[in-house]
Image: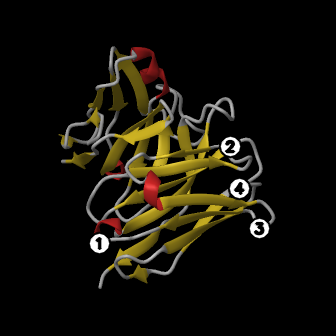
Amino acid sequence: QLQLQESGPGMGKPSETLSLTCSVSGGSISSNHYWAWIRQPPGKGLEWIGSMYYGGSTYLNPSLKSRVTMSIDTSKNKLSLKLRFVTAADTAVYYCARHAGTNWYSPNRFDSWGQGSLLTVSS
Amino acid sequence: QSALTQPASVSGSPGQSITISCAGAISDVDNYNFVSWYQQLPGKAPKLIIYEGNKRPSGISDRFSGSKSGNTASLTISGLQAEDEADYYCCLFVGSLAVFGTATQVTVL
């Protein structure tokens, strides 16, 4: 059974660069799926950050593209997110998810989710 | 600036059926064949309940069904139960961009 587990620093200060990691177990991150980050500010809706395939293909939300880097470490079965120049508006629960589809190149659903990691940005 | 609009809230009594709409500004209606729906219970991660418009993942009750008409997708919950009280989101991945709907809070009266 596929399991995803996010981890991160918990807190950070404005203008810092913060990183989160998603550990995948029960399946290979090198499988024919994309892997995604999605966030949810407290009391608000879901916002897709980006999706990445282990082969390197990446889709990013244009509103975050300039501050986001995603990477995959196949040897550790981990997905990572780096967010630069954070502000209070980046305070959210960050979820990783498998972005699956009928074909690997056409993901259309987030079918497995981690439990989420809260990131708070405050001075 | 979500391109998918949902009603903020929908309510119903136990046993009733309710429908949540997801209306988009995306012009190619065929894209709505790939809408997915998620249920988020309080304090929990979202869970996929419908994909590709009307397909259910293994383990999801057949009380949940999806449909499409033009540029509007819909989620119907039949035989409403107390455990269905949650937030529901639609989502569409098109043009290399994933967009979530504005969320609908379902209340069981």
Residue sitting at x 42%, y 73%: A118
Number of marks? 4
Q: Which mark is residue A76?
A: 3
Q: Give residue A33's mark.
A: 2
Kindly tell me whether residue B46 is visible in this rendering.
no
Q: Residue type at mark 1?
A: Ala
User: Quick one: A14 or A32, which is closer to the camera?
Assistant: A14
The quarter of the displayed image where residue A14 is located:
bottom left
Q: Are marks 2 and 1 on the same chain?
A: yes
Looking at the rendered structure, the kind of residue marked 4 is Gln
Q: Does A41 appear above or below A51?
A: below
Q: Please tell me in which quadrant of the rendered image residue B64 appears.
A: top left
Residue topped by disc 4: A1
Asked if the residues shown at circle 4 and circle 3 are in contact, with their CB atoms under 8 angstroms apart, the answer is: no
Residue B18 percent across, percent down from the top left: 26, 32
Q: Which chain carries label 1?
A: A
What secondary structure is marked by label 4? loop
Residue A53 visible? The answer is: yes
Query: SS class of the residue under badge 3?
Result: loop
Residue pointed to by mark 1: A88
**How packed is label 2: few (under 14 Cα within 10 Å), some, or many (20 or more)?**
many
